[in-house]
Amino acid sequence: MTDLITRDMGISDVIQKHPELVPVFIQHGLGCIGCAMANFESIEQGAGAHGMDIDALMKDLNEAAASTNSNE
């Protein structure tokens, strides 16, 4: 399966295209979805700044995105 969401994507870009993923970001501790840095940081940069497990975040984001796409 090809990932729908990649670590180099901008946080704001992902949220705009997939607002249903906001709870996944929050669950992983990235609660500043609306902060100014979200407009400039990639998922990997944001996760690194917050000391998050990027692999676990990416897995959960892609599972949620795939689930949403299969329901459409």
Image (cartoon, helix red, strand yellow):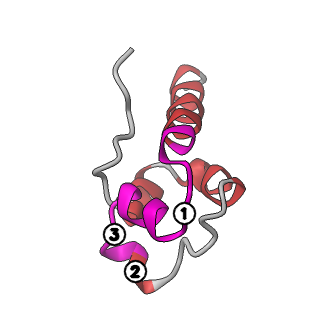
Residue at label 1? Answer: 51
Q: Could you say which quadrant of the image residue 46 lies in? A: bottom left
Say what secondary structure mark 1 lies in: loop
Residue at screen point 28% across, 51% down: 8
Say what secondary structure mark 2 lies in: helix
Direction top: furthest residue = 1
Instruction: Point out residue 48 in the picture as x, y percentages from the top left corner.
Output: 44, 62
Residue at label 3? Answer: 41
Direction bottom: furthest residue = 36
Q: Counting residues from the N terminus, which is met first, the one under dot 2 or under dot 1?
A: 2
Magenta-span inclusion, residue 53:
yes
> Height in image: 46 above or below 14?
below
Q: Callout 2: few (<14), some (14-19), or many (20+) C-alpha neighbours within 10 Å?
A: some
Quarter of the figure with the C terminus: top right
Please, what is the dominant secondary structure of the magenta stretch?
helix
Magenta-span inclusion, residue 44:
yes
Which residues are the magenta region? 38-57
> Height in image: 12 above or below 55?
below
Label 1 amino acid?
Gly
Instruction: Point out residue 1 in the picture as x, y percentages from the top left corner.
Output: 39, 14
> Which disc number belongs to residue 9?
none
Residue at label 2? Answer: 37
